């Protein structure tokens, strides 16, 4: 029986931390439906990663990149524009944003360290698919029917 690579567990753990941190934000804002939709794509690399599948890397990478970019954008915009227009974030929301950003960065670098035997076509197909899924999940989560529940 082959041993699960340490990177696999790291990637899965980082995705799980992101998912849990976002659920905390949802619970603070009286409902996790939005975060449940946003995090749906993360379940695949979580499950695959803890099972040691090399496809965990390729399904996690676009999710980690999108969450890291989202966190950076919120931080940069939030520091100036959103703070003035929408008010301030609670300390818990700021802490969760920091956790999501750190988990995204750590997961991304662990995924880059992880050398897999997945063929380039399969890797790029899975990466593209999960990039589309994660972006779509974020987009759908912004719809009024989900935002106002």
Image (cartoon, grey):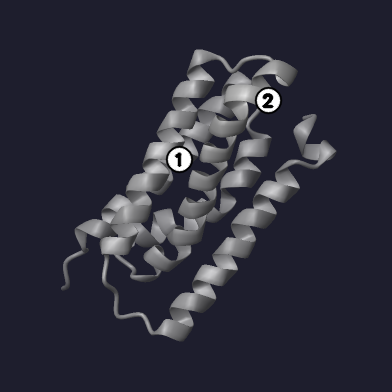
Of 111 and 48, the residue lying toward us: 111
Disc assigned to residue 18:
1
Residue 30 appears in the picture as rendered: no
Residue visible at 44% across and 38% down in the picture: 101
Viewer-side residue, 105 vs 51:
105
Residue at disc 2, secondary structure: helix
| Residue 42 in the image: above or below residue 5 | above
> Image check: 78 left or right of 100?
right
Residues at marks 2 and 1 touching, judged by CB atoms closer than 8 Å: no
103 relative position to 143: left or right: left
Tell me: 116 left or right of 147: left
Position in image of residue 5 (x %, y %): 21, 63
The answer to which quarter of the image holds residue 136 is bottom right
Q: Pick whichever, 100 or 28, lies toward us.
A: 100
- Work out how far the residue at label 2 is from the one at label 1, CA to CA, in angstroms: 25 Å
Within the image, what quadrant is residue 2 found in?
bottom left
Earlier residue among tags 2 and 1: 1
Residue 43 rendering spot, x and y as whole percentages? 49, 53
- The residue that disc 2 covers is 81
Position in image of residue 97 (x %, y %): 49, 30
């Amino acid at each position: 029986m082959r041993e699960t690579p340490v990177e696999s567990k790291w990637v899965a753990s980082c995705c799980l931390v992101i998912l849990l941190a976002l659920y905390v934000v949802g619970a603070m804002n009286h409902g996790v439906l939005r975060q449940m939709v946003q995090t749906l794509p993360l379940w695949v690399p979580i499950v695959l990663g803890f099972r040691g599948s090399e496809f965990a890397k390729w399904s996690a990478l676009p999710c980690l990149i999108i969450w890291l970019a989202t966190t950076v954008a919120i931080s940069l915009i939030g520091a100036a524009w959103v703070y003035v227009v929408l008010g301030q974030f609670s300390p818990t929301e700021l802490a969760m944003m920091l956790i999501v950003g750190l988990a995204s960065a750590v997961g991304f670098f662990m995924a880059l360290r992880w050398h897999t035997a997945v063929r380039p076509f399969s890797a790029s197909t899975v990466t593209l698919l999960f990039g589309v899924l994660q972006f779509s999940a974020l987009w759908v989560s912004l719809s009024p029917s989900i935002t106002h529940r």
